Amino acid sequence: MDQIVFIDMMWLQVYGLNEENILEYFSISPFYDKESNNQILRNQGIFGNKAYEKLNEMIGLEFNVSSSAAATKNPRLFVINKGTRINSREFEITEIFYCLDGSIFQTPTFTSLLRSRISKASNKLVSSHHRIHSLFEFSEEEEEEDKSSSDQRVDPPNSIMSMALPLPSMKNTFSQLSYLANSNT
């Protein structure tokens, strides 16, 4: 998964980063939408708590800092929600961003996350299949060695092995397993 990361070291050195200025920092990132209600209020010179109050009265696109992230009291991590304000009590989240130590990332969508996991699992299955298949490939020399070793087996008298049935040749066993592995693909 490709991911865009935004960081402005100069801004961070001058202003630092805290709960009061995280949205201002976010506004200079490529993730910020200049058509948002946040930008309309910025253009009108309304900032801080007064801006938060006004945002609840407006309808439309908005960015806000997640209150659950603020509750963790972790000054290094901020979660920013992009969504649509439907009324003063309803806010429908469409995208989530996080800022960790000044680096802003967009969280992956469920679809892209699922696609990535399926791709990784598929690659591992194919790789495993190739490995298993390579274990069952014999050369003619190995086949002859297998036949000669099974023909020359001598068990000591009165042992359990002398009473058991002869084992099938390894070549036949591997051939059957290889056939089963190939028939399931």
Image (tube, rainbow, N blue to C red):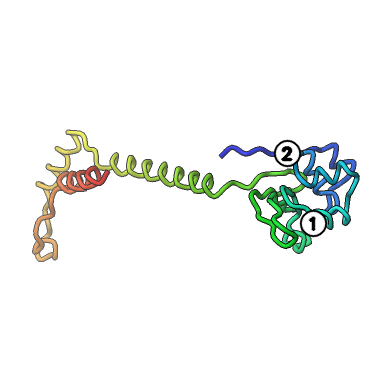
> CA gap, disc 1 to disc 2?
30 Å
The picture quadrant where one finds residue 179 is top left
Q: Which mark is residue 6?
A: 2
Examine the image and state in which quarter residue 13 appears. top right
Query: Residue at image x 78%, y 53%?
Result: 58
The circle drawn on residue 130 is: none
Which of the two discs, 1 and 2, labels the residue nearer the N terminus? 2
Instruction: Give the position of the C terminus as an image quadrant.
Output: top left
Element assignment for label 1: helix
Q: Position of residue 114 (x, y in %)?
A: 49, 48
Mark identifier at residue 57: 1
Residue type marked 1? Glu
Label 1 CA crowd tier, 10 Å (few <14, some 14–19, many 20+) = few
Left or right of 105: which side holds 27? right
Which residue is depicted at the point 66% across and 50% down? 96
User: For the point 85% across and 36% down, which residue is it?
Assistant: 10
Q: Position of residue 174 (x, y in %)?
A: 20, 46
Q: Amino acid at mark 2?
A: Phe
